[in-house]
Image (cartoon, rainbow, N blue to C red):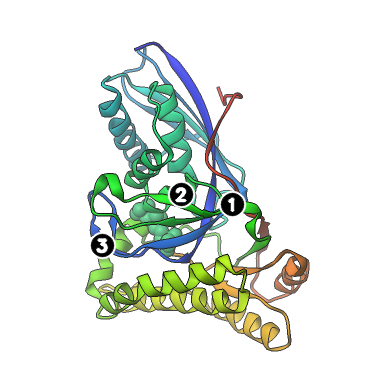
């Protein structure tokens, strides 16, 4: 196997219908399908080189050596690529996020999508988009949705090969904005991977899972029709249902802070006064406000004025994960 290097860029994404809970934890086969928007302004760039001179995989993230747990997770993912390519060479991985560390933006989606695309190219594998998405899923479930472009749907599938994401609309289908309201930069105590495992302990989980396909179908219809009111209502419902599952799992997970609730209340007030904006929240306290491009500056300015808000990031829709010529080392 020749020493080869490849670099990929992948966007983060925000889910409108969330992935929470697995039917198979080891394979990351989700309990429900999910739907999201790639965030073109929040992305990860990753270079991978397989190098016979290395004894073990080396991982650098944002100019620092990764901690051992992260290194092992990345290394486990490289193992899947190596198995597929039929070689055993260790790799060097250098990854950089364009969003500030600790901004509460999940880097696992963009990170594992970029890692998958770069590692496969460096290993000389030529995979179709669906195969890359299914492989990215093994590293982090939401990463499957950052492989295709624009608005994407992760179908549950029947097994490993059929559980992948595909694009349902290109980035320019609808000029939505994600106005990310940061109320905490602290590292979460319970990460998503552990959280998924706790979901089954909540009596509400099965009820959310049962409702998810119909919620997703309705959300997709609203998305394709560019109906913000219909879609926004559904994304808020699903986010709150997911957090209700989290709060009722054992042990319970409370990701919300008082400032989270303050942003929700403010957004509801703005909406009542005629500003079309809807919220969603991932496994953390920060609030994503979804609105149309024409209202994004107003939403951002208002959000910056709320007590407890540390920062606000705004992102446009983003494209598919892609290889680039410029390497990080
Ligand atoms: C709340 O994809 O981060 O953001 O597969 O363990 O890496 P792992 O989990 P992850 O879970 C995402 C959870 C979520 C909802 C979503 O993005 O769909």
**Residue behind mark 3:** 197
Q: Is residue 111 left or right of residue 91?
A: right
**Residue behind mark 1:** 170
> Splitting the image into 4 quarters, where does residue 57 fall?
top left
- What is the x, y in percent for residue 52? 35, 13
Q: Secondary structure at mark 2?
A: helix
Q: Is residue 238 left or right of residue 23?
A: right
Q: Secondary structure at mark 3?
A: helix
Q: Residue at x 62, y 84 (%)?
A: 268
From the image, which quarter does the C terminus lie in?
top right
- What is the x, y in percent for residue 178? 63, 62
From the image, which quarter does the N terminus lie in?
top left
Residue toward you, 220 or 20 = 220
- Single out the mark in the foreground, 3 or 2: 2
The answer to whether residue 255 of the structure is visible from this angle is: no
Report the Cα–Cα distance between label 1 and label 3.
Answer: 33 Å
Structural crowding at the residue carrying mark 2, measured as other residues with C-alpha within 10 Å and reported as few (<14), some (14–19) or many (≥20):
many
């Amino acid at each position: 196997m020749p020493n080869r290097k490849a670099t990929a860029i992948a966007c983060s994404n925000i889910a409108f219908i969330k992935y929470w809970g697995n039917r198979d934890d080891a394979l990351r086969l989700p309990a429900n399908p999910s739907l999201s928007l790639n965030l073109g302004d929040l992305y990860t760039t990753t270079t991978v080189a397989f190098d016979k001179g290395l004894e073990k995989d080396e991982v650098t993230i944002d100019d620092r050596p990764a901690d051992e747990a992260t290194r092992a997770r990345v290394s486990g993912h490289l193992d899947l690529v190596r198995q597929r390519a039929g070689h055993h060479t260790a790799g060097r991985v250098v990854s950089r996020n364009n969003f500030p560390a600790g901004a509460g933006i999940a880097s696992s989606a963009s990170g594992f999508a970029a890692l998958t695309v770069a590692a496969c190219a460096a290993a000389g594998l030529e995979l179709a988009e669906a195969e890359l998405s299914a492989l990215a899923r093994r590293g982090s479930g939401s990463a499957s949705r950052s492989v295709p472009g624009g608005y994407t749907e992760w179908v549950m599938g029947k097994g490993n090969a059929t559980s992948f994401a595909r694009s349902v609309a290109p980035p320019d289908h609808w000029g939505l904005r994600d106005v990310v309201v940061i109320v905490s930069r602290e590292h979460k105590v319970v990460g998503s991977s552990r959280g998924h495992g706790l979901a089954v302990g909540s009596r509400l989980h099965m009820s959310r899972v049962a409702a998810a396909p119909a919620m997703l179908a309705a959300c997709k219809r609203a998305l394709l029709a560019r109906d913000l009111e219909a879609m926004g209502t559904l994304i808020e419902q699903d986010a709150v249902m997911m957090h209700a599952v989290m709060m009722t799992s054992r042990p319970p997970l409370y990701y919300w802070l008082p400032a989270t609730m303050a942003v929700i209340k403010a957004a509801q007030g703005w909406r009542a006064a005629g500003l079309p904006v809807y919220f969603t929240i991932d496994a953390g306290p920060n609030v994503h406000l979804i609105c149309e491009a024409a209202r994004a500056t107003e939403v951002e300015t208002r959000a910056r004025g709320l007590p407890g808000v540390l920062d606000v990031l705004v992102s446009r829709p983003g494209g598919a994960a892609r290889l680039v010529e410029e390497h990080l080392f």
